[in-house]
Image (cartoon, helix red, strand yellow):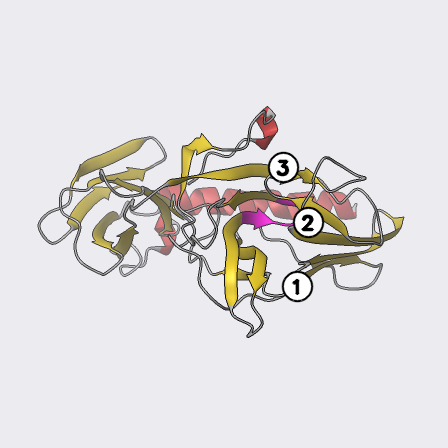
Amino acid sequence: MKIITFLSICAIATNCVHAQLSTAPTPTWKVTLKVVDETGLPVINANAVVDYQSIDQFSGLTDTNGIFVASHKDKSYTLAFDVKKDGYYSVWQRYEMGWAYQYNEAKWNPTIVIVLKRIIKPIPMYAKRIDAEPPTNGKPVGYDLIVGDWVGPYGKGVTIDILFTREYNRKSLQDYDYKLTVSFPKAGDGIQEFQVPYKNMEGSALRSPHEAPTNGYQSQIVRLNMSHPGQKLIFDYDENRVYLFRVRTAIDDRGNIVSAYYGKIYGDFMQFNYYFNPTPNSRNIEFDPKQNLMANLKLTEGVSAP
């Protein structure tokens, strides 16, 4: 009886929403795209596309102020923007206006700033997709970013670039503790998170900065996932994360960095794409997807994002 009552309530609520949608006036939305570069200057003649109702679109070029305007009378809930120009990384972004029966003039007439990042100097890098837990539990396992494998005896890797320590204790599917520690073997090595303003893979195709920073690296990070009956679930995983790292660091007697290698990670542990710049002291992390130095990758290990 409780199940039937619940389903009846859901059905009534759904019917109410459909009724409101069908009887609500059809509003007119107007979106102003302001396309700028990373310095804030307008990008002229960028190709802008505005998708609405999931199947229709407006397209055109930005004007001398980097502006493109689209408007239509319909009941779209979401708009999507795709902006491109030669010499820049493309941007894809969404905007939710809300239901037509909840029409809000400000939300249905937004000005959206789109930032196009310049294509400066894409380089060959070692890039690979990782979707695998460390091969042992309770002790650190090294990973070689150039070889693209665990360090022996678990794989063909030779140099330990990153250490992964998995501590997993499971009593049942709903009762477990999982701790992953990401650490580094050498002084000066480390990792830091780069804040990306957009989620769900929106924003610029180049999600990272063009260059890795010179400082701000920490020697380890810890990710926790825990589930226990009667307690709040802890799930520290975000596929939208971007990390920057420094490895194979050499330091002189005065503590100065003599040599180091830089790279980045898209995603979160242990499902992520990594990119390794093989040129010492080069902080360029702008990857050219056509020049992946990692050979013999499986289909599931390929990387296409810059």
Q: Amino acid at mark 3?
A: Val
Cα separation between marks 1 and 2 = 14 Å
| Upstream in sequence: badge 1 or badge 3 | 3
Residue located beneath label 3 in the image? 147
**Residue at disc 3, secondary structure:** loop
For residue 279, side relative to residue 137 (left or right): left
Q: Residue at x 72, y 48 (%)?
A: 142
Q: Which residues are magenta?
A: 266-271
32 or 90, nearer to the observer: 90
Q: Residues within 10 Å of mark 1 (few under 14, many from 20)?
A: some
Residue located beneath label 2 in the image? 160
Tell me whether circle 1 and circle 3 mark residues in contact (CB < 8 Å). no
Checking the image for residue 220, the label placed there is 1
Q: Residue at x 10, y 47 (%)?
A: 63
| Upstream in sequence: badge 1 or badge 2 | 2
Quadrant of the image containing the N terminus? top right
Residue 132 pos. (x, y %):
71, 39
Extreme residue in the left direction: 64
